[in-house]
Image (cartoon, rainbow, N blue to C red):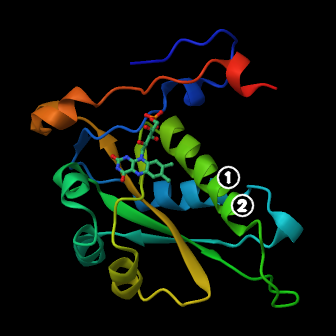
Amino acid sequence: MTRTTRHPILNEIKTRFSNRALTEKEVPQEAYEAMVEAASFAPSSFNEQPWRFYIARGERKEKLLQTLTPMNQEWAIRADALVLTVSKQTFTMNGKPNPWHLSDAGCATGFFMLEAERRGLTAHPMAGFDQKAAREAMGVHEEFALVHVMAVGYPGDFDKLSERNQARNHPAPRKPIEEIML
Ligand SMILES: Cc1cc2nc3c(=O)[nH]c(=O)nc-3n(C[C@H](O)[C@H](O)[C@H](O)COP(=O)(O)O)c2cc1C
């Protein structure tokens, strides 16, 4: 299911896609530490590093799972972990709003996803969850904004997906570079 590109680019960018077919195999703790470390090397405004990652496994995963939309729960139930990314909304140095915190957190989650891909894992981001319920479930302080939840696990078990999820479980197409390169 690798994408074809017109130019030679980083392999993990080509192979990554938002896979819903996950298998219940356990992911080593070391892999989560490595993905978070990869994320930590993202650039950020004034090096604020506004991102934080809640790695919800076991009971915490069950709690976070309940906050996902039914459509997402359907496949994300087989994730080894649900990772809630949150982002600090103000600069630590002066307490002023940080207009770039979501951009920084987005870049960090991109790094997280690419390290996941390199390790043969899937990290699938979702906005389909109840923000208030997820905040309560994980005890997130109000100074942090919720970014998204990633379902992390080993790919597999395509057959366990519902028909509608099987049908859309493929790399999504992209706009041509002529349209986005101005
Ligand atoms: C912020 C964000 C929210 C998303 N929310 C969901 C979601 O709730 N459920 C889902 O199955 N995929 C979700 N996705 C995955 C996108 O649908 C997917 O990234 C997009 O269609 C491009 O496909 P690709 O990642 O396979 O290249 C989300 C992605 C992002 C970045």
**Camera sees residue 157:** no
* Image coordinates for residue 94, horizontal then vertical, percent: 87, 90
Q: Quadrant of the N terminus?
A: top left
- Residue under label 1, please give it: 107
At a point 25% along the width and 38% down the height, the residue shown is: 21
Is disc 1 placed on a helix, strand or loop?
Answer: helix
* Image coordinates for residue 75, horizontal then vertical, percent: 21, 49
Question: Dot 1: few (<14), some (14–19), or many (≥20) neighbours within 10 Å?
Answer: some
Residue furthest toward the top? 6
Lateral position of residue 166 relative to residue 91, left or right? left
- Residue 76 image label: none
At a point 65% along the width and 9% down the height, the residue shown is: 6
Q: How many marks?
A: 2
Lateral position of residue 177 relative to residue 58, left or right? right
Question: Dot 2: few (<14), some (14–19), or many (≥20) neighbours within 10 Å?
Answer: many
Most foreground residue, 95 or 155: 95
- Residue under label 2, please give it: 104
The quadrant holding residue 127 is bottom left
Is disc 2 placed on a helix, strand or loop?
Answer: helix
Q: Amino acid at mark 2?
A: Asp
The quadrant holding residue 101 is bottom right
Q: Quadrant of the C terminus?
A: top right
Lateral position of residue 159 relative to residue 8, left or right? left
Q: Amino acid at mark 1?
A: Cys
Pointer 2 and pointer 1: residues touching (CB < 8 Å)?
A: yes
At a point 36% along the width and 77% down the height, the residue shown is: 134
The quadrant holding residue 136 is bottom left
* Image coordinates for residue 119, horizontal then vertical, percent: 48, 40
**Camera sees residue 1:** yes
62 lies above or below 32: below
* Image coordinates for residue 50, horizontal then vertical, percent: 70, 73
Structural distance between the alpha carbons of marks 2 and 1: 5 Å
